[in-house]
Amino acid sequence: LISVNLMAQQTGVNYDEKEVPNYKLPELLVSKNGRKIKNAKRWEKIRRPELLKLFEQEVYGKIPVDIEIDDVIIHEAAGEAFNGTAIRRQVELVFRKDDLALSANLLIYLPKDSDNVPVFVGLNFNGNHTVSDDPDIRLADSWVRDNPSLGIVHNQVTEQSRGVASDRWPIEEILEAGYGIATIYCGDIDPDRDNFQDGIHPFSYQLGQFRPGYDEWGTISAWAWGLTKAMDYLSTDADVDSSRVIVFGHSRLGKAALWAAALDQRFAMCISNNSGCMGAALSRRQFGETVGSITKAFPHWFCENLNKYASREENLPVDQHMLLALVAPRPLYVTSATEDLWADPKGEFLSAIEAGAVYQLYGTEGLPVNEMPAPDSPVAGSVGYHIRTGKHDITSYDWKQFIDFANQQFTPEQ
Ligand code: GCU
């Protein structure tokens, strides 16, 4: 506690529950013109589209153009993986416009000899080859942030970074549980830097345009778009059950996963791991990371409109419980970690509770508790939640809960 308070003093970040301002959340179930939303039909017809539009205009930025997959290059259809227990598929999705071309490399593992496999899909931070020691994963060749300790210099990866994120990707356990897993390096879609000349953004520019408009896509929208393109491919893959694709992400990539699930209802389930500010956490609490700090440190993640709300959270027409509600009625799992105060665990939990109102319109329970559960004690209705002991991370403990939740949600009740 002492060190947390010290940190707060040093940086002006609030980590004190007593300093959380009094706030009133915008009404989830009242439409813009004051109409009460009393059933799922009205939610879908009136309120859901209104909220989606507000998140597009004011937060993440709308995706201004339709860009379809132009070519699918199968580099590997069914490579043998994990001692013959699985197959590895490596597919390059190519997008083209005029003289622009972009490749998103999708790595897929599926349990051997199974069909109609439910699949987890999510982006990774530093290249597909970082998720496993598997020597046959193709190395990323798009821009990667330098990290000399991983041998990433001049923004290019080397063999040295193979498998460095494997702790976060318990692929064999996932496969053993009967699920496939698919991933794309986020930088294939849009490198994580404040530069709008790279990645997918230029595909949407008119002649003479150099950056998106004030209500157009930032990097998180671009990543979410990339996830919907992965879904486009997965729905053509005969081995995948496209009605059971779970979109997941950790931290900044968790924000992208939530936004992807909101935009694209083909995703059957969504998992937000430690997504924090502008992910699952309520902005109005201003606990840990705030709109002001996130837009300053990562100006490229959002549309420019979001800057209006720095230190003015009360003026936001939405709050993040509304983003979670856009996932309904599909199952949603939210996680926090005890030491991840920057992401505001309590704000993530409260947001998941609030979203329950929309699940109730569909006759399911949302989160079945009112109080935050103790660490390492998952709770689940159609919305699930746990706070794991430890730091900002995605661990095999988290994955075990995702698998349990998915098993529970995908098994038809007897
Ligand atoms: C930073 C950022 C967070 C983000 C995190 C991550 O801490 O402030 O918003 O979630 O990076 O992506 O790990």
Image: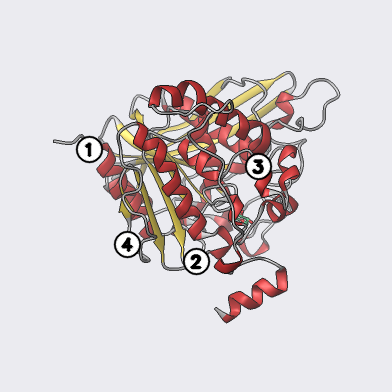
Name the kind of residue labelled 4 in the image: Ser
Q: Quadrant of residue 241?
A: top left
x, y (%) of residue 346? 48, 59
In the picture, the quarter occupied by the N terminus is bottom right
- Alpha carbons under labels 1 and 3: distance apart: 39 Å
Q: Gap between marks 4 and 2, in whole Å?
A: 16 Å
Along the polypeptide, which appears first: circle 2 or circle 1? 2
Q: Quadrant of residue 290?
A: bottom right
Q: Amino acid at mark 2?
A: Lys
Q: Which residue does the numbered mark 4 point to in the structure image?
A: 377
* Spatial separation of the CA atoms under disc 4 and disc 1: 22 Å
Identify which residue is drawn at 62% across, 21% down. 67
Mark 3 secondary-structure assignment: loop
Q: Residues within 10 Å of mark 2 (few under 14, many from 20)?
A: some
* Residue marked by disc 1: 411
Q: Which tag, 4 or 1, sits closer to the chain's start? A: 4
Where does residue 31 sit, x and y in percent of width and height?
Answer: 54, 28
Which of label 4 and label 3 is nearer to you? Answer: 3
Please report the residue visible at 34 percent of the width from the left and 28 percent of the height from the top. 243
Disc assigned to residue 391 = 2
Residue identified by numbered label 3: 316
Image quarter (top left, top right, bottom left or bottom right) of the C terminus: top left
Left or right: residue 109 versus residue 208 is left
Q: Residue furthest bottom?
A: 2
The reply to whether discs 2 and 1 touch (Cβ–Cβ < 8 Å) is no
